[in-house]
Image (tube, rainbow, N blue to C red):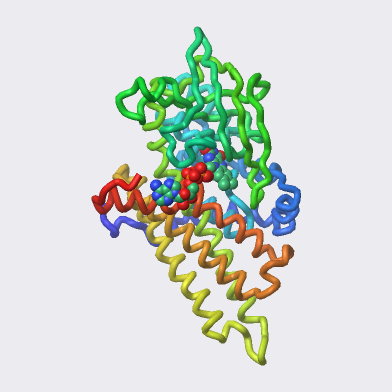
Amino acid sequence: MTMASIELSLTEEQRALRAGVLEICKRYPAEYWRDLDTRREYPEKFVTELTQAGYLAVLIPQEYGGAGLGIREAGLILETINYSGGNAAACHAQMYIMGTVLRHGSEEQKRRYLPKIATGELRLQAFGVTEPNSGSDTTKLQTTAVRKGDRYVVNGQKIFISRVLQSDLMLLLARTTPVDQVKRKTDGLSVFLFDIRKLKGLEVRPLRMMMNHSTNALFFDNMEIPAESLVGVEGRGFSYILDGMNAERILVASDSLGDTRWFIEKAVAYSNQRVIFGRPIGANQGVQFAIAKAHVALEAARLMRDKAAALFEAGEPCGGEANMAKYLGAEAAWEAGNACIDCHGGYGYAEEYDVERKFRECRLYKTAPINNNLILAYVGEHVLGMPRSY
Ligand SMILES: Cc1cc2nc3c(=O)[nH]c(=O)nc-3n(C[C@H](O)[C@H](O)[C@H](O)COP(=O)(O)OP(=O)(O)OC[C@H]3O[C@@H](n4cnc5c(N)ncnc54)[C@H](O)[C@@H]3O)c2cc1C
């Protein structure tokens, strides 16, 4: 795989895909997202329409009812949603969480869940990893799942778990063997997929966050789930989660690229028409260069995202590229967001301009699903061969 394998232009099919998504997005203008943001409500109508049109099932193979397309197409959909002014967070979750089942689930699990996820009959957008006492140090998580006959009994808590109240299913990472009984701390963690509707022993406490993200604290009190909820082999869950990370990084990078483009277009349009001291503010290099720098960052981030996607599609190792794409995308969006809010002056803070909303939304990807410090730690260790820092 070389740089020459990266397709710089979109195919006819990809253009049609983007146009189709854009058409739907037009029916959900800024007022829709602003109103949901104020009320901190989930974009139910938008997600349902996108699901019914098949866009959120692009990564599910055709034999399980999906479109069987690649990560580039999935990224294009997310980028388009954020570029149009919306928020694709719920959409990227629905696209990639099922990947763990697809790669490691039994044939029975795949046949039971994937076709229904593809049609939207079942929604899988909840992914429970983060805990209050372990944070980024995932192997230290304390939630336990203990096998009792034909059930697992789950105890513990999770924090910042999104879209639990809007999902039918949840993917959960829990410890099945105590850490002092395993050779490596990455052993003994298991992944479960189960129906959370009417589940006893699960308490969900919504958290009001900086942006509209349907995020919750979860408490498991002797929560019983069927033994067949286990995905793959007991104790191997950590490696299954790692397997899905490259796809997740590429998709999150795509969210950020969409945000970046939205900020830049908005900033250029405003700077060209706002006249202060007798000329457009965009004529001032203090305004213009910040926007131009954000554009340079966008182009670099897009190339890295496309490189990561090309490697991913070819089945080549892409850990470095996927991580760098997520890093560059999140930083480009942040840079563009700052340039956009700056050039708008006081209007950048007014809700009706949407800049402050997008600014809050794009900030998340510097922190989650993994913070950019840990991306740099990955690059230092795995790409540059430097000592592990944590
Ligand atoms: C809106 C939102 C939605 C989320 N949704 C989900 C979800 O659906 N499911 C889920 O499982 N999680 C979710 N998360 C959690 C998210 O993935 C975590 O917040 C993130 O992984 C960091 O964990 P933490 O908050 O405990 O930070 P910590 O691990 O406590 O880290 C705090 C900060 O310290 C720094 N840091 C820590 N360790 C190092 C190191 N070794 N080197 C350098 N710097 C370091 C980093 O800058 C980091 O940002 C969500 C978070 C938010 C804010």
Q: Nearer the viewer, residue 145 or 280?
A: 145
In this image, 274 relative to 70: left or right?
right
Residue 382 horizontal/vertical position (percent): 28, 48
Most distant residue in the bottom direction:
278
Q: Quadrant of residue 168?
A: top right
Q: Is residue 9 visible?
A: no
Residue 183 horizontal/vertical position (percent): 30, 25
Q: Residue at x 59, y 54 (%)?
A: 81
Q: Nearer the viewer, residue 268 or 381?
A: 381
Q: How many marks?
A: 0
Q: Residue at x 56, y 86 (%)?
A: 283
Q: Residue at x 54, y 29 (%)?
A: 115
Most distant residue in the left direction:
385
Picture layout, residue 170 above or below residue 381: above
Query: Which quarter of the rendered picture does the C terminus lie within?
Result: top left
Residue 294 horizontal/vertical position (percent): 49, 70
Picture layout, residue 269 above or below residue 3: below
Q: Residue at x 54, y 64 (%)?
A: 261
Picture layout, residue 364 above or below residue 301: above
In this image, 13 relative to 2: left or right?
right
Q: Is residue 126 visible?
A: yes
Q: Nearer the viewer, residue 201 or 350?
A: 201
Q: Quadrant of residue 80?
A: bottom right
Picture layout, residue 295 above or below residue 77: below
Residue 247 horizontal/vertical position (percent): 42, 44
